[in-house]
Amino acid sequence: MKQLKIVVVDDHAVVRSGLMMLLNGKHQIEVIGEAADGQEGIQLAQRLQPDVILMDLSMPHGMDGLTATTELKRLLPDVAVLILTMHDDDEYLFSAIHAGASGYILKSAPHEELLTAIHCVGTGNAYLYPTATKRLMNEYMERLKHGENTGTFESLSEREKEVLALIAKGFSNKEIAEQLMISVKTVESHKSNVMEKLALKTRPELVKFAVKKGLLHFE
Protein backbone atom coordinates (compact mmCIF):
# COMPACT_ATOMS: atom_id res chain seq x y z
CA MET A 1 0.00 0.00 0.00
CA LYS A 2 1.49 3.32 -1.06
CA GLN A 3 1.90 6.30 1.25
CA LEU A 4 -0.94 8.78 0.70
CA LYS A 5 -0.11 12.49 0.79
CA ILE A 6 -2.86 14.58 2.38
CA VAL A 7 -3.73 18.28 2.54
CA VAL A 8 -6.25 19.36 5.21
CA VAL A 9 -8.51 22.35 4.42
CA ASP A 10 -10.60 23.66 7.34
CA ASP A 11 -11.11 27.14 8.76
CA HIS A 12 -10.74 25.92 12.36
CA ALA A 13 -7.10 25.61 13.47
CA VAL A 14 -8.05 23.18 16.24
CA VAL A 15 -9.69 20.84 13.74
CA ARG A 16 -6.67 20.97 11.45
CA SER A 17 -4.30 20.25 14.35
CA GLY A 18 -6.45 17.37 15.55
CA LEU A 19 -6.58 15.79 12.11
CA MET A 20 -2.83 16.16 11.64
CA MET A 21 -2.18 14.48 15.00
CA LEU A 22 -4.62 11.69 14.16
CA LEU A 23 -3.41 11.02 10.63
CA ASN A 24 0.22 12.00 10.24
CA GLY A 25 2.62 9.09 9.93
CA LYS A 26 -0.07 6.50 10.59
CA HIS A 27 -1.68 3.93 8.29
CA GLN A 28 0.48 4.96 5.32
CA ILE A 29 -0.76 8.57 5.51
CA GLU A 30 1.35 11.73 5.52
CA VAL A 31 -0.21 15.16 6.04
CA ILE A 32 1.90 17.47 3.87
CA GLY A 33 -0.03 20.72 4.26
CA GLU A 34 -2.93 22.58 5.84
CA ALA A 35 -5.06 25.52 4.71
CA ALA A 36 -7.70 27.74 6.32
CA ASP A 37 -9.88 28.28 3.23
CA GLY A 38 -10.52 26.95 -0.24
CA GLN A 39 -8.30 29.37 -2.13
CA GLU A 40 -5.32 28.60 0.09
CA GLY A 41 -6.09 24.91 -0.33
CA ILE A 42 -6.04 25.22 -4.11
CA GLN A 43 -2.68 27.00 -4.03
CA LEU A 44 -1.21 24.35 -1.72
CA ALA A 45 -2.54 21.53 -3.87
CA GLN A 46 -1.01 23.01 -7.01
CA ARG A 47 2.34 23.31 -5.27
CA LEU A 48 2.39 20.06 -3.26
CA GLN A 49 0.40 17.71 -5.55
CA PRO A 50 -1.30 15.65 -2.80
CA ASP A 51 -3.20 12.42 -3.37
CA VAL A 52 -6.17 13.47 -1.23
CA ILE A 53 -7.57 16.75 0.04
CA LEU A 54 -9.72 16.67 3.18
CA MET A 55 -12.13 19.53 2.52
CA ASP A 56 -14.52 21.25 4.91
CA LEU A 57 -17.67 22.68 3.31
CA SER A 58 -18.42 25.72 5.48
CA MET A 59 -15.56 28.21 5.56
CA PRO A 60 -17.23 31.63 5.92
CA HIS A 61 -14.07 33.75 5.84
CA GLY A 62 -12.73 32.52 2.52
CA MET A 63 -13.59 30.37 -0.48
CA ASP A 64 -16.11 27.70 0.56
CA GLY A 65 -15.53 23.99 0.12
CA LEU A 66 -17.92 23.43 -2.79
CA THR A 67 -16.44 26.24 -4.88
CA ALA A 68 -12.92 25.07 -4.03
CA THR A 69 -13.74 21.47 -4.96
CA THR A 70 -15.11 22.52 -8.34
CA GLU A 71 -12.00 24.59 -9.07
CA LEU A 72 -9.63 21.88 -7.81
CA LYS A 73 -11.16 19.25 -10.07
CA ARG A 74 -10.77 21.62 -13.00
CA LEU A 75 -7.12 22.33 -12.23
CA LEU A 76 -6.06 18.97 -10.77
CA PRO A 77 -8.51 16.30 -11.95
CA ASP A 78 -6.40 13.45 -10.54
CA VAL A 79 -6.48 14.75 -6.95
CA ALA A 80 -9.24 13.14 -4.86
CA VAL A 81 -11.35 15.44 -2.69
CA LEU A 82 -12.89 13.94 0.44
CA ILE A 83 -15.51 16.20 2.01
CA LEU A 84 -15.27 16.13 5.81
CA THR A 85 -18.19 18.08 7.25
CA MET A 86 -20.76 18.42 10.01
CA HIS A 87 -23.59 18.73 7.46
CA ASP A 88 -25.68 15.55 7.37
CA ASP A 89 -27.83 17.07 4.65
CA ASP A 90 -29.00 15.68 1.31
CA GLU A 91 -28.54 18.92 -0.64
CA TYR A 92 -24.94 19.39 0.57
CA LEU A 93 -24.22 15.76 -0.25
CA PHE A 94 -25.71 16.02 -3.73
CA SER A 95 -23.90 19.31 -4.42
CA ALA A 96 -20.56 17.90 -3.26
CA ILE A 97 -20.83 14.97 -5.66
CA HIS A 98 -21.72 17.29 -8.53
CA ALA A 99 -18.75 19.49 -7.64
CA GLY A 100 -16.47 16.49 -8.20
CA ALA A 101 -15.83 15.17 -4.69
CA SER A 102 -14.77 11.54 -4.48
CA GLY A 103 -16.18 11.08 -1.01
CA TYR A 104 -18.35 12.57 1.74
CA ILE A 105 -17.96 11.78 5.44
CA LEU A 106 -19.22 13.40 8.64
CA LYS A 107 -16.94 14.90 11.27
CA SER A 108 -18.81 12.81 13.84
CA ALA A 109 -17.63 9.58 12.16
CA PRO A 110 -15.30 7.22 14.07
CA HIS A 111 -11.59 7.60 13.35
CA GLU A 112 -11.48 4.18 11.72
CA GLU A 113 -14.15 5.21 9.24
CA LEU A 114 -12.21 8.36 8.31
CA LEU A 115 -9.09 6.31 7.68
CA THR A 116 -11.07 3.90 5.52
CA ALA A 117 -12.56 6.81 3.55
CA ILE A 118 -9.14 8.37 2.93
CA HIS A 119 -7.66 5.12 1.62
CA CYS A 120 -10.77 4.49 -0.46
CA VAL A 121 -10.68 7.81 -2.35
CA GLY A 122 -6.87 7.81 -2.38
CA THR A 123 -6.85 4.61 -4.40
CA GLY A 124 -9.29 5.90 -6.99
CA ASN A 125 -12.57 4.75 -5.50
CA ALA A 126 -15.57 6.64 -4.13
CA TYR A 127 -16.74 6.75 -0.51
CA LEU A 128 -20.02 7.81 1.08
CA TYR A 129 -20.84 7.44 4.75
CA PRO A 130 -23.37 4.70 5.67
CA THR A 131 -26.94 5.42 4.50
CA ALA A 132 -25.74 8.25 2.20
CA THR A 133 -25.69 6.09 -0.93
CA LYS A 134 -29.37 5.22 -0.62
CA ARG A 135 -30.29 8.83 0.14
CA LEU A 136 -28.31 10.05 -2.85
CA MET A 137 -30.00 7.58 -5.18
CA ASN A 138 -33.45 8.41 -3.81
CA GLU A 139 -32.83 12.12 -4.34
CA TYR A 140 -31.58 11.55 -7.88
CA MET A 141 -34.54 9.37 -8.80
CA GLU A 142 -37.00 11.89 -7.36
CA ARG A 143 -35.51 14.68 -9.46
CA LEU A 144 -35.71 12.54 -12.59
CA LYS A 145 -39.25 11.50 -11.75
CA HIS A 146 -40.40 15.11 -11.59
CA GLY A 147 -38.45 16.11 -14.69
CA GLU A 148 -36.09 18.38 -12.79
CA ASN A 149 -32.55 19.17 -13.86
CA THR A 150 -30.15 17.08 -11.78
CA GLY A 151 -27.60 19.88 -11.55
CA THR A 152 -27.84 22.04 -8.42
CA PHE A 153 -27.72 25.79 -7.97
CA GLU A 154 -25.53 25.27 -4.89
CA SER A 155 -22.77 23.75 -7.03
CA LEU A 156 -22.21 27.14 -8.68
CA SER A 157 -19.64 29.58 -7.34
CA GLU A 158 -20.85 33.00 -6.20
CA ARG A 159 -19.46 34.59 -9.38
CA GLU A 160 -21.19 31.97 -11.55
CA LYS A 161 -24.48 32.74 -9.80
CA GLU A 162 -23.99 36.45 -10.55
CA VAL A 163 -23.29 35.73 -14.21
CA LEU A 164 -26.30 33.39 -14.40
CA ALA A 165 -28.63 36.08 -13.03
CA LEU A 166 -27.31 38.76 -15.42
CA ILE A 167 -27.54 36.49 -18.47
CA ALA A 168 -31.12 35.62 -17.55
CA LYS A 169 -31.94 39.35 -17.31
CA GLY A 170 -30.85 39.78 -20.92
CA PHE A 171 -27.46 41.46 -20.52
CA SER A 172 -24.82 40.77 -23.17
CA ASN A 173 -21.43 39.30 -22.31
CA LYS A 174 -19.86 42.73 -22.76
CA GLU A 175 -22.39 44.40 -20.45
CA ILE A 176 -21.88 41.69 -17.81
CA ALA A 177 -18.11 42.12 -18.05
CA GLU A 178 -18.47 45.86 -17.47
CA GLN A 179 -20.82 45.42 -14.50
CA LEU A 180 -18.63 42.82 -12.79
CA MET A 181 -15.36 44.44 -13.87
CA ILE A 182 -14.03 41.29 -15.47
CA SER A 183 -13.08 40.41 -19.05
CA VAL A 184 -15.54 39.21 -21.68
CA LYS A 185 -13.50 36.01 -21.95
CA THR A 186 -13.99 35.40 -18.22
CA VAL A 187 -17.74 35.94 -18.59
CA GLU A 188 -17.81 33.39 -21.41
CA SER A 189 -15.87 30.94 -19.24
CA HIS A 190 -18.30 31.38 -16.33
CA LYS A 191 -21.27 30.96 -18.66
CA SER A 192 -19.80 27.75 -20.06
CA ASN A 193 -19.23 26.41 -16.53
CA VAL A 194 -22.80 27.25 -15.53
CA MET A 195 -24.27 25.50 -18.57
CA GLU A 196 -22.11 22.44 -17.96
CA LYS A 197 -22.82 22.17 -14.22
CA LEU A 198 -26.56 22.55 -14.73
CA ALA A 199 -26.64 20.38 -17.87
CA LEU A 200 -28.30 23.19 -19.85
CA LYS A 201 -27.89 23.55 -23.60
CA THR A 202 -29.72 26.76 -24.54
CA ARG A 203 -30.23 30.28 -23.23
CA PRO A 204 -34.01 29.76 -22.80
CA GLU A 205 -33.29 26.76 -20.55
CA LEU A 206 -30.91 28.94 -18.53
CA VAL A 207 -33.54 31.69 -18.18
CA LYS A 208 -36.16 29.13 -17.12
CA PHE A 209 -33.79 27.80 -14.46
CA ALA A 210 -33.08 31.33 -13.20
CA VAL A 211 -36.82 32.08 -12.97
CA LYS A 212 -37.38 28.92 -10.91
CA LYS A 213 -34.61 30.01 -8.56
CA GLY A 214 -36.11 33.51 -8.19
CA LEU A 215 -33.10 35.31 -9.65
CA LEU A 216 -34.97 37.79 -11.84
CA HIS A 217 -35.38 40.60 -9.34
CA PHE A 218 -34.98 43.88 -11.22
CA GLU A 219 -34.12 47.04 -9.33
Image: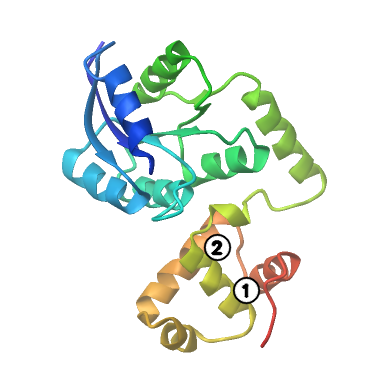
Q: Quadrant of residue 30?
A: top left
Name the spot of residue 56 as percent of width and height, x first.
Answer: 44, 39
In the rendered view, how is the structure colored? rainbow
Q: Quadrant of residue 52?
A: top left
The local secondary structure at tag 2 comes to helix
- Note whether residue 79 is visible: no
Q: Is residue 80 left or right of residue 193?
A: left
| Numbered label attached to residue 135 | none
In the rendered image, the residue lying farthest to the left is: 47
Q: What amino acid is found at the position of numbered circle 2 in the picture?
A: Met
Name the spot of residue 190 as percent of width and height, x first.
Answer: 45, 68
Q: What amino acid is found at the position of numbered circle 1 in the picture?
A: Arg
Whether 58 is drawn above or below 25: the answer is below
Identify the residue shown where x is 48% and y is 43%.
57
- Note whether residue 69 is visible: yes
Whether 201 is drawn above or below 96: the answer is below
In the rendered image, the residue lying farthest to the right is: 146
The local secondary structure at tag 1 comes to helix
Residue 191 vs residue 51, the one in the foreground: 51
Name the spot of residue 162 as percent of width and height, x first.
Answer: 53, 72
In terms of sequence position, does the residue under pointer 2 or pointer 1 come before the other?
2
Task: Report the residue marked by disc 2.
Answer: 195
Task: Report the residue marked by disc 1.
Answer: 203
Q: Is residue 65 left or right of residue 27?
A: right
Identify the residue shown where x is 57% and y is 71%.
164
Name the spot of residue 188 as percent of width and height, x first.
Answer: 43, 74
Identify the residue shown where x is 64% and y is 82%.
169
Residue 123 vs residue 39, the one in the foreground: 39
